[in-house]
Image (cartoon, rainbow, N blue to C red):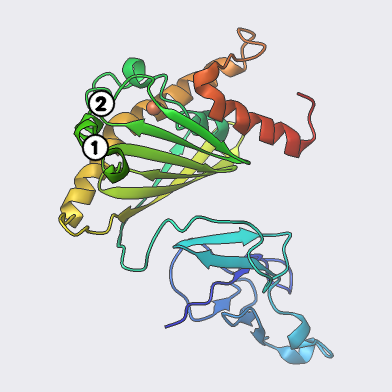
Amino acid sequence: MTIKVRAFINACRHRGMQVANGEGCARSFSCPYHAWTYDLDGSLKGVPGADGFPGLDLAANGLAEVAAWESGGLVYVMQEAQPGSPLPITVYDFFTPDQVLFHQSKTEDSANWKLLTETLLEGYHIKSLHRESFFPYGFDNTNIVENFGENSRVIYPFKRIEKLRSVERDQRDISGMATLVYLLFPNVSIAVLSKHTSVTIIEPISPTKTHMVSYHIKHRDTEDTVITLDDARRDLDFVNQSGQAEDREAARAIQETVTTRANSHLTFGYYEKAIVAFHQQLHHLLGEQE
Ligand SMILES: [Fe+2]
């Protein structure tokens, strides 16, 4: 089965009402205001009381389409690109069709989206903030921090990576030996954990409120290891209930100090270079001075 991904601006062509809400599966979109109805390809197919709109060209009044692509299990939407044009960026295929989406979650925090994003991008706080959660399994401030253009990746090794010392260098595989956190600039994080991968979209609702929507996908089995859904769920519960909760709490606490006069600027060290790159990109795109 070929799946075609499409994206539209959620606005009825009649008077601008939103035609879809929330999530789910639909065979068409019917505007709740006056019931103008659109097909899944965006075309306008029904106008109640059409006599009242003489000369209305249905073909010219489909939903406004924006460019969308699916690649490696992720959907990319770009408002500036032409629908139907090739994907204009190089992407890494994170997923294969045999992988299972086993959970979806949402959180809302009273913190700016950038503060929440920053918690993902350095391991300098593993021992201090995550003393009881991540630190027993990992190392403090021992990470590989890499920038790739606008994007970055931070690798957090587990203590068990020590086992690879006895493996020939060219035979080493770090799968299950480290957490890899990718930031797809500006607001998507992909965390490759032991048994599953989490894709999180960090959505600002206001300067002081943020929604995070996460999708959790089980790793595929390897030749010698079967990963069950229970394994993946346990992995997820551990991360969500311990380390991630600590990170979110830190972001909320910082939010309460950023509007005070305590800090005219915040300070970042070499360990935090993925955060520095993140802010530089934002400054650049917003046309601000460094
Ligand atoms: Fe953290």
Against 135, is 17 above or below?
A: below
Amino acid at pointer 1: Phe
Amino acid at pointer 2: Ser
x and y percent of residue 235 in the render? 23, 43
Image quadrant assignment for residue 47: bottom right
x and y percent of residue 134 in the render? 28, 27
Point out the quarter of the image occupied by ligand 1. Answer: top left
Q: Which of 185 and 115 is in front in this view?
A: 185
Image quadrant assignment for residue 206: top right
The answer to whether the residues at label 2 and label 1 have Cβ atoms under 8 Å apart is yes
Q: Mark 1 points at which residue?
A: 238
Against 282, is 269 above or below?
A: above
Against 125, is 22 above or below?
A: below
In this rendering, position of residue 116 left or right of residue 228: right
Q: Is mark 2 within 8 Å of ligand 1?
A: no
Q: Residue 133 carries which label?
A: 2
Nearest to N terminus: mark 2 or mark 1: 2
x and y percent of residue 66 in the render? 67, 67
Q: Which of 146 and 58 is in front in this view?
A: 146
Q: Which residue is drawn at 32% across and 30% down?
A: 243
* Element type where label 1 sits in the image: helix
Q: Which residue is drawn at 59% across and 83% down?
A: 39
